[in-house]
Image (cartoon, rainbow, N blue to C red):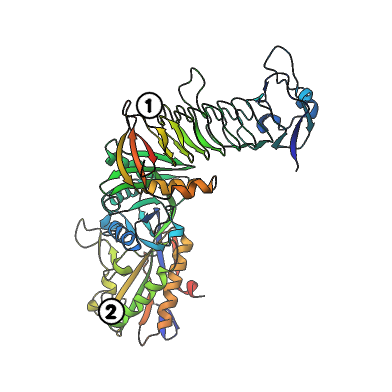
Amino acid sequence: MSPFVFTLRDAPAQRLDLSPLTPDRLVGQSESKVAAIQLQTTRERVLVGDVFKIRMGDAAQIRFSGGSERFDRIGAGMSQGEVSVDGDVGIQAGRLMQGGRLAIAGNAGPWAASGMTDGCLTISGDAGDRLGGPLAGETLGMRGGVVIVRGNAGARAGDRMRRGMIIVEGKADSHTGSRMIAGTIVVRGRAGRLPGYLMSRGTIVTVEGSDGLSPTFVDSGVHDLLATALMARYIQTYSPGVAAMLRRPWRRLLGDMAVIGKGEIFCPVAN
Amino acid sequence: MSQLTVNGIRVDDTFAEAFEMRATALTITAHNAAWARQAAATMTGFATSVIGCGCEAGVDRVLNPDETPDGRPGVRVLLFAVSTTELQKQLQARVGQCVLTSPGSACYAGLEADERLKLGNALRFFGDGWQISKRFGDRRYWRIPVMDGEFICDATTGLSRTAVGGGNIIVMGATPETTLAATERAVEAIATVPNAIMPFPGGIARSGSKVGSKYRGVIASTNDAYCPTLKGAGNSALDPDITSVLEIVIDGLTSDAVAAAMRAGLRAILALGPDRGALRIGAGNYGGKLGPHHYRLKDLLS
């Protein structure tokens, strides 16, 4: 069956909340009902039919033809199926995602994968700040699933992450894995300043090192651990290039000793 | 007892009687195949019979690096016990004392099932707070710091409630040498059958037992009917030309695995012939009233 396609008519006049357009919520809906779904984030009402041309199809495969940095909360809360976007998206893409696959061909704004618990989010471009992180007032960020960023990630990627895997194939800005509780972050390019800032547990791999580590991390030497081999095997299907780079000895830093110090950063041997 | 003769060897018209057991499987890896085998051998030592060892265990097969979770050489081990509680106890003690301690080892779930037994979830406390949990997809590992690096262990492993223990072949020959030769051939053949183990030394038991004893409190005693030195006294089941008897006991994750293993063993003994091997083949049972699985030798040969 062909996918369910939303084709963007014109650039949206306001930010849109696209969270209703997930496989979970579109299954069994008629075209008229779908066209009448409200997407506005201001007092001016915007319906799906105003913004998109709709081609009905399999609600388990939703495609957005055309993107915008005003596409907020796309794929939010989805638990099954596939959603793909041909272009950019705005804030909170895949927020609280529980399953399924969300693929963004362009860039994503801040808080992508925020509080995600399962599923797979792929961002082919760059990700904004606080990838996987919690919103204000929340205590936990990402709690499961896999996020792959083919480009660069903004600051505080994996903030307060509790479980799951974030793979950044490009560079990451400062404070990667800040306040991390557990989980795994791999940055293939160089990480910005202070990765693992106040992390209590969890694993960060900075394949090309970072712009500066907190002095509250201690060097535990160079190790060739099975854990990184198992990590490489798991990553293989998501990012073969990164997986290949993991299979070697790493310098292991323990921290952040400013908190409980049970986290680890793997960095190049000559760091 | 009625018999049929195949390739000059007498095959009793009888059956092996086997019981349902709880079982699990592990994949043990190490830097090289020798150390993987060492860890597996240590862990499955003193695990010949549930009568005295708490469990029955053995090596199912050697694994190539591309068959193991960490890409290193490995060995698949099977453990069988009469209850889930005892299996959990034996698993924890044996992995903790024999695999965790073995240089470079790692231990992974070797059986997928909905019901789980604790593996790393029980051993992690050895880490004294330094242990690290790592979840990759639906697998959760424990990383326990040890003196040569880290011991990696799956959090849990699968439990089978439909495993079968007690499949057996009784090999009878003219001399100890020919009887052993035939039994060794059978062990070699059975070793190639997946999901089945032979828990006794080298796969062979020379002291088959019967239930009970004349002595109070002794739950098993020598199988006097098959002891050649007792021919002529009591209820000997042996013919005049038999002077040596050996037994192969087989445990399998499934009834089909036990049947396949017995079939492989029988064929190997028959192929060797009576001059260099066995004169007669039998099987042990309790009249068919105790164990739900019956493996009739005649059926296995058809």
Q: Secondary structure at mark 2?
A: strand
In which chain is the residue bearing label 1?
A: A
Residue under numbered circle 1? A198
Position of the C terminus of chain A by quadrant: top left
Q: Which mark is residue B111?
A: none
Residue B13, image x, y percentages? 43, 75
Residue under numbered circle 2? B244
Q: Could you classify mark 1 by the number of other residues whose Cα lies within 10 Å: few (under 14), some (14-19), or many (20 or more)?
A: many
Is A86 situated left or right of B137 in this image? right
Asked if residue A179 is positioned above or below residue A233 in the image, the reply reads above
Q: Secondary structure at mark 1?
A: loop
Q: Could you classify mark 2 by the number of other residues whose Cα lies within 10 Å: few (under 14), some (14-19), or many (20 or more)?
A: many
Q: Say what amino acid the circle numbered 2 marks.
A: Ser
Position of the N terminus of chain A by quadrant: top right
Q: In which quadrant of the rendered view does residue B125 lie?
A: top left
Q: Residue furthest top?
A: A43
Is B186 situated left or right of B236 in this image? right
Q: Is residue B232 visible?
A: yes
Q: Residue furthest left?
A: B215
Residue A262, image x, y percentages? 33, 33
Q: Is residue B113 visible?
A: no
Please tell me which residue lies in front, B233 or A12. Answer: A12
Residue B174, image x, y percentages? 30, 84
Please tell me which residue lies in front, A167 or A170. Answer: A170
Please tell me which residue lies in front, B239 or A4. Answer: A4
Q: Which residue is pictured at 67% across the width and 20% down the height?
A: A15
Can you tell which of label 1 and label 2 is closer to the viewer? Answer: 1
Q: Say what amino acid the circle numbered 1 marks.
A: Leu
